Amino acid sequence: MPETDLAAEILRLKKERNAVILAHSYQRPEIQDIADFVGDSLALARAAQKTECDVIVFCGVHFMAETACILNPTRKVLLPDLNAACSLEASCPAEDLAAFLEANKEKNYYVVAYVNCSIGVKALADVIVTSGNSQRIIETAPTDRPILFVPDQNLGAWTARKTGREMTLWNGACHVHQQFTRDQVLQQKALHPEAEIVCHPECQEVIRLLADHICSTEKMIPYCRESKAPSFIIVTEAGILHRLRKLVPGKEFIPVGTEKCACAECEYMKLNTLEKLRNCLRDMAPEVTVPEELRLRAARPLERMLELSK
Ligand code: 13P
Ligand code: SF4
């Protein structure tokens, strides 16, 4: 079916189902273009919490749809492809975290979990953070308890440096951000000496040290708009380039290639397609659901985060 017909069917079904389509900035351009709302994890969590639509179609990965279920339990949450996982989430299984906390009980860790984690990990956390608010949230952490930051060691290390708070870091990472190398970034800089380097805090320290600015995907938009630079080397998943080109016209956005690809793509994020989006609105499946007991425990640290980042 041509893309325009698919898009028309999606819009018709969306109305019929009283659904809202939320999309992360790493989604395919055609999905971003049809979504009601495109944003980073923080903005999407807020949008999911507030929506009054009966159905939330989450064009993102599984933990994001799960977060929508936790924050807005009376809505039906659909994910176009249930296989849309996350390597960062997988790097911290809830059983491993529970065992670590049990073995280190005497430390009484204040557990800070990056939102890229399972509901089981969220339920063990004191507070959740996103890349857009980690500094602000850590600044409110109790000073009489040691901090354990899970699962992303890179976001944790960056936040620790920015806030001056010492933290024990879980040994987790995102495979997409982990693959950027110093040479790849420097190669682009040599080709575009006028460009500023903007990277996501999920990148490793060798990359963060090269960057002119480090921020979440959402904050890249105002940063690039307000900066005097004519071009930017963007070191994160390539989906954000579509948004940047749309929202900041007249400036150039340059991706950083990896060994596998001319730009870095998260294969999980790219599992969602227009066709699967149409199918899920048509079939009202696949649906993401969460056990109520776990939901209640995971809601507390998530709501704390939303409260603290108002
Ligand atoms: P943000 O969009 O919140 O910066 O997160 C990046 C990411 O990797 C999400 O999976
Ligand atoms: Fe997870 Fe990385 Fe993909 Fe984001 S880009 S969904 S952190 S694997």
Image (spheres, rainbow, N blue to C red):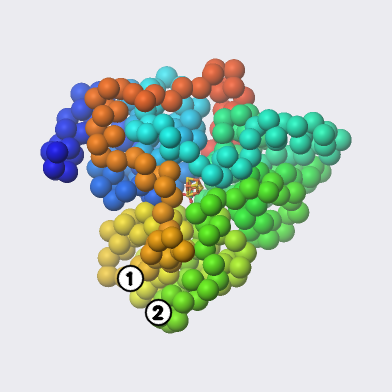
**What is the crowding at mark 2: few (fewer than 14 residues within 10 Å), some, or many (at least 20)?**
some
**Amino acid found under the numbered disc labelled 1:** Glu
Residue 211: % across, % down: 53, 70
Q: Is residue 291 left or right of residue 55?
A: right
Q: Element under label 2? A: loop
In this view, 178 is above or below 184: above
Q: Earlier in the sequence, mark 2 or mark 1?
A: 2
Residue 307: which quarter of the image? top right
Residue 92: % across, % down: 63, 39
Q: Is residue 222 visible?
A: no
In this view, 41 is above or below 156: above
The residue sitting at 24% across, 25% down in the picture is: 282
Give the labeled residue for mark 1: 252
Q: Is residue 123 visible?
A: yes
Using the numbered discs, state the Cα–Cα distance from disc 2 to disc 1 in whole angstroms.
10 Å
Give the labeled residue for mark 2: 192
Q: Nearer the viewer, residue 46 or 83?
A: 83
Total labels: the figure holds 2
Residue 235: % across, % down: 47, 63
The residue sitting at 27% across, 22% down in the picture is: 283
Q: Element under label 1? A: strand
The residue sitting at 61% across, 68% down in the picture is: 206
Q: Is residue 134 left or right of residue 105?
A: left
Q: Is residue 146 left or right of residue 194?
A: right
Mark 2 residue's CB less than 8 Å from ligand 1: no
**What is the crowding at mark 1: few (fewer than 14 residues within 10 Å), some, or many (at least 20)?**
some
**Amino acid found under the numbered disc labelled 2:** His
